[in-house]
């Protein structure tokens, strides 16, 4: 089976190339410059994909903040991505980035083998704004310290980002389905937590002293 020919470098190749960046540190600005005009979808993937995997506590806040800015600007229809200096100049070790890329690449390359431009009516100007709006809601959820509550929203953002980068409407549609599933799951968990909390306080109120 022949591998599909892509008119531009795949995201996996760009990620791997950046892992060989000279110097001991990378900044978010380096990643932004590296992806150029594909920055919106690519950076949605870069910052969301690590959160799909089990990661140390606190990482969701570090990666979630850029996601909020990226998705908000996609929703607003900005032609170029802008990040405040405090986020753009944030540094991390190149070795840590390379280790993270090594974890993501096997999954990403399997997905990329199935991606191609199709169903592009799902990626028109207004459709992309709506993708940005939903991804923004998910990014805010990812940013919040909800134990195990950010994995499914992060997956939805990553898949939507891949759909944008590869102009694959089918991947975007799958991202929509994952987004709806994650929102429904979080709504169910929030309702269950509220019911449990109410039952706990009711028990305290009715128990004899």
Image (tube, rainbow, N blue to C red):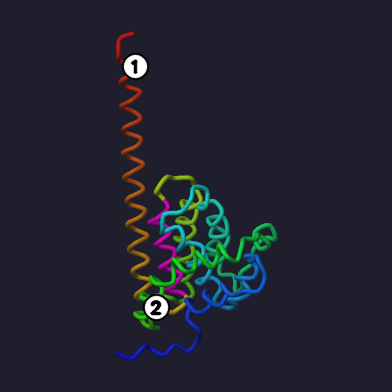
Frontmost residue, 127 versus 116 = 116
The quadrant in which residue 191 appears is top left
Q: What residue is disc 2 on?
A: 112
Q: Quadrant of the N terminus?
A: bottom left
Q: Name the spot of residue 18 as percent of width and height, x first.
A: 57, 74
Frontmost residue, 204 versus 125 = 204
Mark 2, residues whose alpha carbon is within 10 Å: few (<14), some, or many (≥20)?
A: some
Q: Is residue 114 left or right of residue 9?
A: left
How many numbered callouts? 2
Q: Name the spot of residue 76 as percent of width and height, x first.
A: 56, 65
| Residue located 39% across and 48% down the image | 148
Q: Which mark is residue 149?
A: none
Frontmost residue, 57 versus 192 = 57
Mark in the foreground, 2 or 1: 2
Q: What residue is disc 1 on?
A: 205
- C-alpha gap between disc 2 and disc 1: 56 Å
Which secondary structure lies at badge 1? helix
Circles 2 and 1 in contact, beta carbons < 8 Å: no
Per the picture, the main secondary structure of the magenta-coloured stretch is helix
Q: Quadrant of the C terminus?
A: top left
Frontmost residue, 1 versus 195 = 1
């Amino acid at each position: 089976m022949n591998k599909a020919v892509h008119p531009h470098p795949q995201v996996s190749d760009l990620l791997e190339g950046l892992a060989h960046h000279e110097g001991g540190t990378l900044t978010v600005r380096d990643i932004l410059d590296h992806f150029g005009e594909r920055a919106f979808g690519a950076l949605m993937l870069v910052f969301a994909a690590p959160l799909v995997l089990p990661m140390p506590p606190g990482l969701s806040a570090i990666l979630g903040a850029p996601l909020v800015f990226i998705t908000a600007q996609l929703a607003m229809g900005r032609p170029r991505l802008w990040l405040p200096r405090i986020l753009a100049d944030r540094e991390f070790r190149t070795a840590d980035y390379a280790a993270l890329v090594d974890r993501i690449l096997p999954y990403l390359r399997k997905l990329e083998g199935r991606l191609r431009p199709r169903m592009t009516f799902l990626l028109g100007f207004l459709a992309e704004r709506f993708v940005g709006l939903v991804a923004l809601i998910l990014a805010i959820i990812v940013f919040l310290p909800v134990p195990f509550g950010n994995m499914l929203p992060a997956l939805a953002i990553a898949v939507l980002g891949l759909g944008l980068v590869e102009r694959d409407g089918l991947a975007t549609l799958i991202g929509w389905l994952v987004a709806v599933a994650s929102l429904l799951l979080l709504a169910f968990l929030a309702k269950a937590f509220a019911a449990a909390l109410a039952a706990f306080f009711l028990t305290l109120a009715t128990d004899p002293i």
